[in-house]
Image (cartoon, coloured by chain):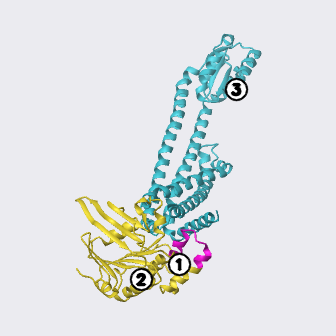
Chain colours: A cyan, B yellow
Amino acid sequence: MSIFYLTFGRILKSGWNNFLRNRWLALATISVMVLAIFFMTGLIFVNLIGKTLLVNLQNKVDISVYLKQDVSEQDVSIIRSDLTFLNEVKDVNYISADEALASFKAKHQDNAVLMESLQELGNPLLPVLNVEAQEASQYEAIVNFLGQDKYQKIVDKINYQQTKPLIDRLSSFTNKVSRGGLIISIILALVAGLVTFNTIRLAMYNFRHEVSVMRLVGASNWYIRGPFLVEGIIYGVIAAVSTTTLLFISLYFLSPKINSLVPGSDLLGWFKVNFFSLLFFQTGAGILLGGVGSLVAIRKYLKV
Amino acid sequence: MVHDSVIEFKNVSKIYQTNNGECAALTKVDLAVRPKDFLSVAGPSGSGKSTLLKLLLGEERPTDGQIFFNGQDIALFSTSEMPHLRRRIGTIFQDFKLLSNKTVYENIAFAMEMVGKPTKEIEQDVPQVLELVGLSDKTEYFPHQLSGGEKQRASIARALIHRPEVILADEPTGNLDLLNTWDVVRLLLKINELGTTIILATHDREIINNLNRRVITINRGKVIRDEENGRYVL
């Protein structure tokens, strides 16, 4: 057992020494790894911005439920509370005919012709319920819900038919963006992983003679691999910590700007909340790239 | 099985597969090396000397025949068991094969560290061996900071450190000048006097004629001469 710890300690020490003595090689490998990990986490943030953007767009879409001219206050409050009770509904906003007229007048007060005709007509506007769903795809269900018999005498018409194409487009856009984003993320992560792996392979190619010498003087495979594995893991940890630092600096300056473009996307806040899981993910990716990369790369030089 | 041989080749052939067909490096070699022998393997370049040593070290496998090390058939060692064979043999190469990332001290300590020798023993043995080869003042140098002769002495120290039964030297003087050549030869003789079997492959006529020890001569893959107190004749 003690020989195990002795050997383990020697492998650690040797790996650390190799790291210190191959500083330039280490720097090159680590920078490629930083780029790869930065890219991978960058995608999380792009995803985050995309989601916020879509939520913002979806919030702008609603349907207007026009009620009959002579609807009673009681009926309005019933249909309103029924709607609020639905899971799909996020918000219901009631505008009475008078309120609608007031805002119409305010909007068109400079248009003399409109004002005159309004005076002759009285109030042609209908009371309206503006319904906002949780997700764009849920409007269909809400419209069906309002199609029930008991609402026939209250509801005059729903402008869903006019809004429907817009809503459909938005739903399919959301789906496409998230699916496409996933595919692109996977491809980019693969590319970054391959580039890192190849960098490590080239680094290992430099050491092929050393590896065969160690074999020829009688070192066991694990005694040869160990230090390279340790070195790879050191690369991974350093790359992860550097990436996190780099990310913090870029978010510190970019987050306010992005937030003003896409309101509600507080990337820096998200970074702070998820700091440890992010660091964990990055360190994991780094160790996986560095450690597994060097193990696979060294394999073929161990066959002497 | 002859028990008084450290190394025995029985009808060993090695055929390399090349793009131009087969190339026989060794043909039906029979050879027995006794303990404490100082055996020189003479022959021109390409005669099969290196192949002979590579077979012994398990770097190459024979196409035909058997090789015994202390009565053990080395064909039975798998790739993962090969280190156990190699730890009982010290090897000196023409191109030194030092680990460029490690200092002289670390290069030599490596051979002890890899078998799990205690640090105390390493700290005791390495300076002794370095003194024997005359490198006491260069322990913290890296290989690229040493001259050719110093590199070869470091590699001899590494081959010695774990007290192997046999030392294989493949053209150890091939890259050295005259002065360093004789340093190395004298060192090998000294090691042999201390009880280690030595197999020296060389094409250097001067060395072989001056050693006055057992010589086998190989030409075109065949042992054509095996003489006690031999000379380089070809």
Mark 3 surroundings within 10 Å by alpha-carbon count, few (fewer than 14), some (14 through 19), many (20 or more): few
Kindly report the distance in space between the C-alpha atoms of the residues bearing marks 3 and 2.
Answer: 99 Å
Span shown in magenta: B106-123
For label 1, the residue is B105
Residue under the point 48% across and 52% down: A193
Residue A168, image x, y percentages: 53, 27
For label 3, the residue is A93
For label 2, the residue is B188
Q: Of the residues shown, which amino acid type is indicated by label 3?
A: Asn
Q: Of the residues shown, which amino acid type is indicated by label 1?
A: Tyr
Kindly report the distance in space between the C-alpha atoms of the residues bearing marks 1 and 3.
Answer: 83 Å
Q: Nearer the viewer, residue B118 or A105?
A: B118
For residue A299, what is the image quadrant? bottom left
- Asked if disc 3 and disc 2 are in contact, CB closer than 8 Å, the reply is no
Residue A201, image x, y percentages: 44, 59
Q: Of the residues shown, which amino acid type is indicated by label 2?
A: Leu
For residue A130, what is the image quadrant? top right
Is label 1 or label 3 in front?
Answer: 1
Q: Nearer the viewer, residue A161 or B111?
A: B111
Residue A278, image x, y percentages: 62, 50
**Is residue A262 positioned above or below A296 on the image?**
above
> Which element is circle 3 on?
strand
Is label 2 or label 1 in front?
Answer: 2
Kindly report the distance in space between the C-alpha atoms of the residues bearing marks 2 and 1.
Answer: 20 Å
Chain identity of mark 3: A
Lower position in the chain sequence, tag 2 or tag 1: 1
Chain identity of mark 2: B
